Amino acid sequence: MISSIQQYIDKIQALIQSQSDEMLLLKQLTPITKQLAQTQQCPKVDENTIDTGMDYQLFPLFEGENHGLFITLISWMPGSTTPIHNHNTWALVTGIIGTETNTLWRAVTPVVYEGEVELEEDKTIAVSPTTVLTLGSDAIHCVKNLTNEPTLSLHIYGKNPYFTQRSQFLPEQQLAIPF
Ligand SMILES: [Fe+2]
């Protein structure tokens, strides 16, 4: 049973070393991520420290060598939306406070970092404290806070997405641009 963030980091690093198949790794990380999110020891943010003047705010918890294994809390303000984007690395997301709406998109032409890409909307998943959303390296999504309160969620990335050459997608123009 996971009872601290350090125990979670140790466990996740061991699983990354032993499991090279991304889908199987995400499957193995799901129950321990749920355990961490549900323990009293799960890092949280005092709601008074959330800057409601921003669309969203990151509260990084851990970053491994060469930006590998990045764990962060993220708060989204009411009404805020991310661009449609990929991460170019695997990710897990679980809710801590409130419910975020994730919309997943499917690429119907090959994905490029910058250039022509055609997308179609796939499905919408509500991420609350009982949900663990897994996103493979090729996943494309956007996040919306459709509620009236700031949300807080825990994000675990195979690599810090600020260093993964991720793209933003504009489905109407059928375009990918650097994000
Ligand atoms: Fe994302």
Image (cartoon, grey):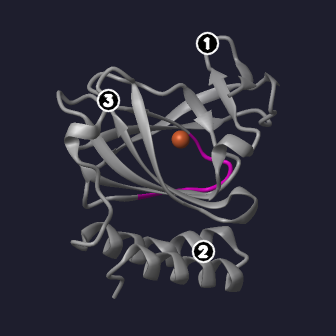
**Which residue position is annotated with label 3?**
51
* Residue positioned 61% across, 12% down in the render: 172
Secondary structure beneath dot 3 equals: loop
Q: Earlier along the polypeptide chain: callout 3 or callout 2?
A: 2
Q: How far apart are labels 1 and 2 at the CA level?
A: 34 Å
Q: How far apart are labels 1 and 3 at the CA level?
A: 32 Å
Q: How far apart are labels 3 and 2 at the CA level?
A: 34 Å
Q: Nearer the viewer, residue 174 or 99?
A: 99
**Which residue position is annotated with label 1?**
172
Q: Which stretch appears magenta? A: 133-140
Asked whether the residues under the numbered discs 1 and 2 touch, taking CB atoms below 8 Å apart as contact, a structural biologist would say no
Q: Quadrant of residue 53?
A: top left
- The C terminus lies in quadrant: top right
70 vs 77, left or right, is: right
Q: Alpha-carbon neighbours of circle 3 within 10 Å: few (<14), some, or many (≥20)?
A: some
104 vs 80, left or right, is: right
Q: Quadrant of residue 136?
A: bottom right
